Amino acid sequence: MYRSLRPVQTEKLHARGLTFHVYRWPGSDPDPLVLLHGWGDTGETYQFLVDCFAADRTCVAIDMRGFGRTQWPADGYWFPDYLADLDALLDRLAPDAPIDLVGHSMGGNIAMLYAGVRPQRIRRLVSLEGFGMARTTPDQAPARYAEWLDEVKHGTEFAVYDNYEQLVRVLARRNPRTPKDRVEFIARSWGQTRGDGKVELRADPKHKRTNPVLYSREQAEACWSAIEAPLLFVVGDQSDLAKRLGDEIAEPRLRSIYRQLSFATVNDAGHMMHHERPDEVAALIEEFLESK
């Protein structure tokens, strides 16, 4: 099992009718670096990245609604709720000054939209492959709504595992570049033991529902273009997601949207770069945050 270098404190914050689980790594810096995780992940697995930061950097990570140890809402999920959650939580975590914000994947998308609609709240912004989704067309709507209705009616489920060893094997196959001790840590963070001894994921199965509302890249880019903070955009050179989006995230295209953009690539890393190469990712982030 991975041995953490920096001790973590946990707390619960109540916001918007839910109880959120928050991880805090104290440092001498009074202003926290806020970390948002991706879909299916938890704030806890930022431990690897935090261990590679300077010891005086205060870091805070949040389990987003329906993930990790944060409460599940009674109904389903609507993406703008993540922005409202973040807005409410930042009023508690850092009420008096603009913050530095890091987001991975889904968390990166939340961070970039938020930075565009609340530009005064963000000092510097880092997006680890949080570069939106593929464009959609209106003709996709009927099938999307039908799929969503079927899932609401019949339910959605995550896989259940016989034990933690099986979950570790599955995660290791999916993420072959992540060392085994980190995979074991991730499995313990993502999983929990049921009453029958089997292991289930700490995530609401309703997250697997299809989003009936088509993604609008045009609306997302309108928000992104309103970002005032300097932005570091990081991709993994082995990322399948980056390859699928292709020209949408090519550097010339991104520079046409963002006012102050730095672009970096992590070698020998896929989409889960913060698990695979936390040392290199941390170095990129710290250099960016400390630059003038």
Image (spheres, grey):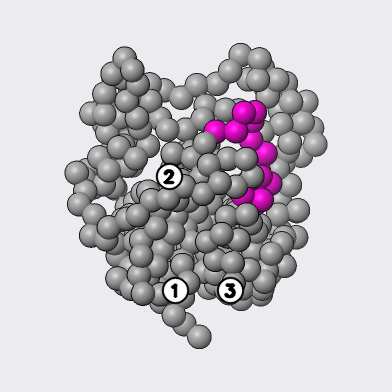
Q: Say if 94 sits above or below 69 in the image.
A: below
Residue 79 among magenta residues: yes
Q: Which residue range is magenta in the image? A: 72-85
Q: Residues within 10 Å of mark 1 (few under 14, many from 20)?
A: few
Which amino acid does the dot numbered 2 rest on? Thr
Which amino acid does the dot numbered 1 rest on? Pro
Q: Which residue is mark 2?
A: 42
Q: Residues within 10 Å of mark 2 (few under 14, many from 20)?
A: many
Residue at (80, 36) in percent of width and height: 138
The x and y percentages for residue 60 are: 44, 59
Residue at (58, 18) in percent of width and height: 155
Q: Is residue 209 left or right of residue 2?
A: right
Q: Quadrant of residue 114?
A: bottom right
- Res 30 label: 1
Q: Which residue is mark 3?
A: 97
Q: Say if 145 sits above or below 124 in the image.
A: above
Q: Say if 260 sits above or below 90 in the image.
A: below
Q: Say if 268 sits above or below 164 in the image.
A: below
Marked residue nearer the N-terminal end (1 or 3): 1
The residues tagged by marks 2 and 3 sit, at their Cα atoms, a distance apart of 26 Å
Q: Is residue 139 left or right of residue 49?
A: right
